[in-house]
Amino acid sequence: MHSTIMNFPLTIPHILQRAERYFPDREVVSLIPAGVNEAGQPIPGKHKYTYRQMAARARQLANALKEAGIQKGDRVATFAVNHFRHLEAYFGIPIAGAVLHTVNVRLHPEQLVYIINHAQDRILLIDNVFARMLPALLPHCPSIEKVVIMGPTPQSIPGMLDYDQWIGAQPTTFDFPELDENDPAGMCYTSGTTGHPKGVVYSHRSTVLHSLASALPDALNLKHADSLLPVVPMFHVNAWGLPYTATMVGAKQVFASVFSDGASLAKLLSEEQCTRTAGVPTIWMGLLQEVERAIQAGTPYDLSKLEMLVVGGSAAPESLIRAGDKLGLHLFHAWGMTETHPLGTCASVPVGVDVESDEGYHYRAKQGIPVPLVEIRAVDGDLNEVPHDGKTMGALLVRGAWVSQEYYNNPEGSRATQVRLDDQVWFDTGDIITIDEEGYMAIQDRAKDLIKSGGEWISSVDLENALMGHPAIAEAAVIATPHPRWEERPLGVLVVKPGQEQPSREDLNAFLAEKFAKWWLPDAYVFVEQIPRTTVGKFLKRALRDQFKDFRLEQ
Amino acid sequence: MHSTIMNFPLTIPHILQRAERYFPDREVVSLIPAGVNEAGQPIPGKHKYTYRQMAARARQLANALKEAGIQKGDRVATFAVNHFRHLEAYFGIPIAGAVLHTVNVRLHPEQLVYIINHAQDRILLIDNVFARMLPALLPHCPSIEKVVIMGPTPQSIPGMLDYDQWIGAQPTTFDFPELDENDPAGMCYTSGTTGHPKGVVYSHRSTVLHSLASALPDALNLKHADSLLPVVPMFHVNAWGLPYTATMVGAKQVFASVFSDGASLAKLLSEEQCTRTAGVPTIWMGLLQEVERAIQAGTPYDLSKLEMLVVGGSAAPESLIRAGDKLGLHLFHAWGMTETHPLGTCASVPVGVDVESDEGYHYRAKQGIPVPLVEIRAVDGDLNEVPHDGKTMGALLVRGAWVSQEYYNNPEGSRATQVRLDDQVWFDTGDIITIDEEGYMAIQDRAKDLIKSGGEWISSVDLENALMGHPAIAEAAVIATPHPRWEERPLGVLVVKPGQEQPSREDLNAFLAEKFAKWWLPDAYVFVEQIPRTTVGKFLKRALRDQFKDFRLEQ
Ligand SMILES: Nc1ncnc2c1ncn2[C@@H]1O[C@H](COP(=O)(O)OP(=O)(O)OP(=O)(O)O)[C@@H](O)[C@H]1O
Ligand SMILES: Nc1ncnc2c1ncn2[C@@H]1O[C@H](COP(=O)(O)OP(=O)(O)OP(=O)(O)O)[C@@H](O)[C@H]1O
Ligand SMILES: [Mg+2]
Ligand SMILES: [Mg+2]
């Protein structure tokens, strides 16, 4: 017997057409650099248009790509921050059957060259503000046939196309190619926190399914009435897929371009009556500071419509979540990675638990439970599930309808992360977690960052989160430092809050002793001006370890 | 280039395992008949257990089916109302690779025999309250090898198995068969409103996708914290798929079994603090009456947690929606059919529109816009889209990820409903609709029930909805009656509210004249005790037409 259900491939054109048909007047708002001030800093201008215009321009882009000879599966790269033209590329490229490769604009030129060559990008759409980098890149990127500059170009750059002119010459109707739902649609490289960025190729199907699950009420709860500002960059894991999810439900989309400091964000969130926003912890630290400052100054922002600040990418300390609530800024913790599109788990609290109770914060500081169509396991070295006691650490394996099982053209990387368990393929995330009785998982560390002390593991992330709750500490990273007897011991690297004294080791360890066993407490602390960060705002432990490689604990 | 995403089939076992792993203690509550009172009426008892127990028993059922020789694709029928054992069958049957065939318990024995033979069901799970029908059925249903009685069986029935004993003998672990997401999982027949019931076969994939889309915030907004009472029967379009959707998100499920009168429902909704419920308009008419009565009597129900009453299956008149709001019972209009799993469209209002304003009611009385992964068109006889003016009627075509493109073993029925448009397959619903400028569709009629007057169409549903807003009218059906000059003219068949006078034709048409052109107004009205209904509570126009086939309009 066969099902009588029709074949209806899950593809990105459906998302675009739905928005255009049912939400044509819903707005897309972008801050864009409109000149520079005396200090050479960009001044924001505001651009507004609607899904109707967005969809028409996305189809023009698709036509331009077709005319340029782009074939099914060819890569078209974007080198851009968050704005409406980038949104057009999110749709125009995949609806043409091509693959949207979003390049991380903050990588070093060498890494950029590596990635572009690895992906074999044929066309590059690049923001005008980054055009100055082209001379350093292009000679090393022979696959690139065409460069198209997005945004008003002050001086015309010889040999380069202007995006608006280029697509403007095209019709707004487009003859959609036939697409299989498993056809590739997008390509992202990992952040490079633990090594060289590795490439992942999303499909139309995975993008659509990820959008559906992301919008669910227990996930990001995204709906037509929402106004969403994804601060997370469109060059990083597709801005967590939000441009697709928001378009699918017809939400208003707001983009901040290069203006992601606390003051710019607070102003934009307020002006556009945003209901939801998404970003990494550092972004929210900046926003909280600014919102608090404005209250002190007697000129508070009106953020009364803002219901949810999704936080992920690295762990949000409980102290940050509590501080947010005090200001009416409600952080919602999610976990994911480039390899998972990214949404894997999120920390909605169990029914009956008050979100602002101690119990509520306990759950909200964890990374939560998987959304539908994602499965996770925490396993020991023999691939046995570790006990769900909230204590025992295990390697996080994941599988699901939008989880990558390998890296693009990287058999070695693929082999290193593929695991077979219960007759199924799982992806080994490289994250170390605990799972509690309720199934809530908490990231303890990267496998590479774990501190191995006397045969036991110490979670650097746990210590960091606790230290960042100390009144004098702004930022804390904990790394392993060699120890003759215990192999490794924790070293705390701290940034004090402005105007605060450096606390003593005794003080800090007394503070930690409430939560941790004695043998977890760092043996030493050092104070620094700032913790080195990755291009997307994560602590760069590799760099820290390097910096302190000669540090020796007093015996 | 290929996507690097893993193959993760969308299957029903994933839904079950998710609920068990993350929501093991969430409750499933069922009213069940626990004896009869002096009048021979069933007395309700309450059964409560958790997803943990439900999942264990579903696996026991799967083992029992396997032991009984049930193979992949074999049909296992249920003949049952809404309760926990039926929920176990919703999972136990498909996870075993078999096909859940939910038989409509209210059909005539002849139709039952027709359906069971057509589906070739091998095992029948039947409620004890229906066991008395078996002698009339079984001799004519040779495909049925085993009958299993669900619910305490007063006297043991020779040759029949007791469900609890049967599954109780099995282990609670189950070796899941390998499933393709396109494998058949469920089978439903249409209501038989317009003719013989026709069979549709759902797949694992369509069930999972339908669940995801149903739970979206702009659809039924279903989440873990919800307590859901689907009044719509589990033998009718899978209770609108809600048992799957609710399990996927880990919501509490409440079942009313045979107790669907206003008083029983109001009590149950209140006791179980339901937040959501779903049913056809007649059910809500009954509930509203009871809630109003209780208020008058000074013993109101506490329905303060109830946020949404999903209404569909036939049109909810605007007057009903308004009356509900006055009592805090917020109706949410959805459209669908057996062939669409059923969710096709729902009437969330556009952003910025107050749901309790005139504009809000205008949208809410329509059937709304399609959910993601469903597409609709309204076309004329030449398959051209009719104007989106909210006036021009067209035939409703639908396609989508859970839409059936044919009927099971019914090539004639399949041919009659399959349409090719824009190079794609569409399903012709048999519904006649309008679509307005905002894309909101409104059901005007069944194609078979349209009144063709002088070459123009008159919508019986529109007239009915308006008439049911008249203060003296409880129910109204409008049918075509032959006319020598105009071919057909509308005849109104009315039920007056208790204690009200029969209004005159002049009075009724004056009431309608505010909304309709003169040539739409019925030429005559007749008053009846009740409108005949289908097994699932829809007006049975076939029967009405039959009843009034000799009615002649005065010339
Ligand atoms: N909510 C969170 N809490 C803690 N860590 C998180 C959270 N969300 C994401 N992460 C971390 O971010 C990682 C995914 O990040 P991403 O895909 O951007 O690249 P990366 O892992 O930082 O870089 P690379 O894989 O190249 O080393 C996860 O594996 C996890 O370690
Ligand atoms: N919200 C609604 N408003 C108006 N009509 C509705 C609504 N929801 C469903 N319907 C009607 O119900 C039909 C689907 O019902 P169902 O699948 O139960 O079988 P049926 O069409 O009544 O029976 P059959 O196809 O055997 O004649 C739709 O085609 C439509 O006519
Ligand atoms: Mg990584
Ligand atoms: Mg029908």
Image (cartoon, coloured by chain):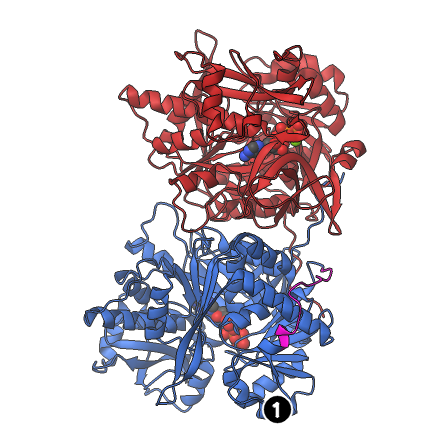
Chain colours: A blue, B red
- Residue under the image location 62 percent in, 73 percent down: A168
From which residue to which does the magenta span run?
A166-179
Residue B548 point in image, percent of width and height: 63, 12
Q: Mark 1 points at which residue?
A: A158
Task: Read off the chain for label 1.
Answer: A
Badge 1: few (under 14), some or many (20 or more) residues near its Cα, within 10 Å?
few
Residue B418 point in image, percent of width and height: 75, 40
On-image quarter of the N terminus of chain B: bottom right
Q: What residue type is labelled 1?
A: Pro
State the residue in front, B507 or B209: B507
Q: Which residue lies furthest to the top in this view?
A: B38
The answer to whether A424 is drawn above or below residue B550 in the figure is below
In-image side of B362 versus A198 (left or right): left
- Residue under the image location 29 percent in, 55 percent down: A356
- Residue under the image location 76 percent in, 46 percent down: B420
Rendered image quadrant of residue B75: top right
State the residue in front, B494 or A191: B494
